[in-house]
Amino acid sequence: MSYRTKSDHQNQVDVRCIAEKILLMAPLSVNHFSICKSKPANFTAPTMPVTTTPNAGLDNTSKLPSEQIRQTLTRDYSTLRFRIEYGGYLSNHLLHAVVALHELGASEQKIVGYAAHYTQKLESEGPDHEDVIEGASTVEILSDEEVQALLGKRQKYDALLAYYAREVKKLGVDGAVCKHLPYLFSGLAGALLHGIIQLGYAYHIGGDRLVAEGLAYQHHCYLPFDEPSMSPGKEPLRHFTRQTVLEVADAVTSNEFLRSEQDRLMNVSPIKDLGVGEIQRGLNVLSGHSERNSPKAFALIWRQINEFDFSTFNGTFALDIVLWLYVMLEHNDFVVLHAATSAWSLQQLEHLLSPSDKAKAWRVWFHVTLSALVTARARDFRQQDICTESPDLEVRVAALPLWSELRATALDLPGFPDEHVYKMVQVAGDHAQSKQSAFLTPLERELVTRTAALTVIAIPFKPYSQPPQ
């Protein structure tokens, strides 16, 4: 990992200034190397110059072989060594972080160093921990009925892992996901979306053990958002446009009943006794869980979703929408970021679902995303659409750092940044390669994805304990 010296300043891009200009919707100069000479006094993000160092992963040829990453993850970083959760309920992000670093083009030294830092907070398995996949003698062999009874109970993870490992061995990775994902995607909100994130990142990099771990974790943390039976509306279905998406986002985030239901139920049993964080408790209130939720709140959000046409909805649509919402907020939102990384994760798996199940899965995802916006108290949407068509849209895109510079900047951040920074830059960079016109045009997508990467690099996350007013 290299650092720029003062003599390199003339070749640096001040990411903070560019991000601030974008986020304030100010016009950008084509020469983005000279946009900002001074920094706003109240802008406190750490200095993060864009560099073009050899470690930066400027193209796919610099990436380590995927098989090497799979082997390292399985041997050194899987549940053979570290538990899937720590601190009672926090999700182990190590697999996601390593895969994101790999996709950004990180060196082996960078990946190993970051993993060594990250694992300090994880719960390690002891030297006598049995491998539940490779013939452990004491692991419980679960029947299908027993597995079903454990859905969302957050119990017996090792037994679930052994079950899904047998399924992967018998059916292959694709076969096991095809068989089980239709019964799991309605619970993708569990553990703040980390079950589906674990599975999506595992599937992306490959590996039987890693995929079995993802299936087991999605089962383990399942939080139901099953679509209730509702009569079809009389009005024509709405199409996904920036106006309609912002309208529905504003409708749910400004709804006093939804907020008051969350505040009320989060502070009484059984939700206050769950032993999870505030964000997860908030999602429980808006979920379909029969013992924890507000049925009226759950139905209210579903009625909003039922107004939309999902016939052509897919991962490209989802990522367009959520990344646009992310940059339309006037802060860097940690909860909405999870909606983005979960959309990318589900996109890795959507081809394994039938057309009807794929539509259902994305409806669930959109419901969870709207619920996440409510939970995050994310209401400070910009007055002006960042993608408003104008003659200078191409100029604005050209003013932004290239993806090679953004990847380099992310990898060269000093110290050990939050792993979500790497994941968002990786997801945004991957999505930028899509040429499909969906919710955004390719040019609008380039603006949104680069802005998302700049935002997560340069702007600190808004603390959940201080939601926007």
Image (cartoon, helix red, strand yellow):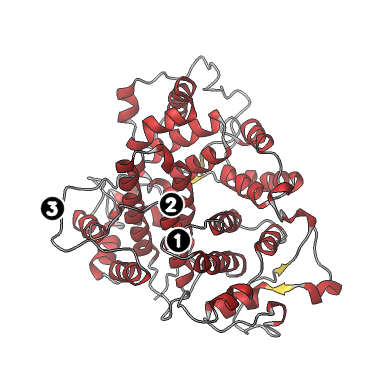
For image coordinates 49% across by 81% down, the residue present is 390
Give SS at disc 3.
loop
Q: Quadrant of the C terminus?
A: bottom left
- How crowded pointer 3 is (Cα within 10 Å; few <14, some 14-19, many 20+) is rated as few
Residue at image point 37% right, 30% down: 179
Q: Which amino acid does label 3 sit on?
A: Ser
- Where is residue 195 drawn, in percent x and y? 44, 43
Q: Mark 1 = which residue?
A: 437
135 over 309 or under it: above or below = above
- Visible in this render: residue 460? no
Question: For the point 39% across and 52% down, which residue is it?
Answer: 280
Q: Residue furthest right?
A: 7
Q: Do the residues labelled 3 and 1 touch (CB within 8 Å)?
A: no
- Foreground: 360 or 83? 360
Q: Earlier in the sequence, mark 3 or mark 1?
A: 3
Mark 2 belongs to which amino acid? Gly
- Mark found first going from the N terminus, 1 or 2: 2
Per the model, the C-alpha gap separating discs 2 and 3 is 27 Å
Q: For the residues marked 3 and 1, what is the alpha-carbon distance in whole angstroms?
A: 32 Å
Residue for badge 2: 315
Q: Is residue 33 left or right of residue 147?
A: right
Q: Is mark 2 on a helix, strand or loop?
A: helix
Tell us which disc is closer to us: 3 or 1: 1
Q: Is residue 25 visible?
A: yes
Q: Distance between the residues labelled 1 and 2?
A: 12 Å
Q: Where is residue 397 in the image (x, y as percent from the top left)?
A: 59, 73
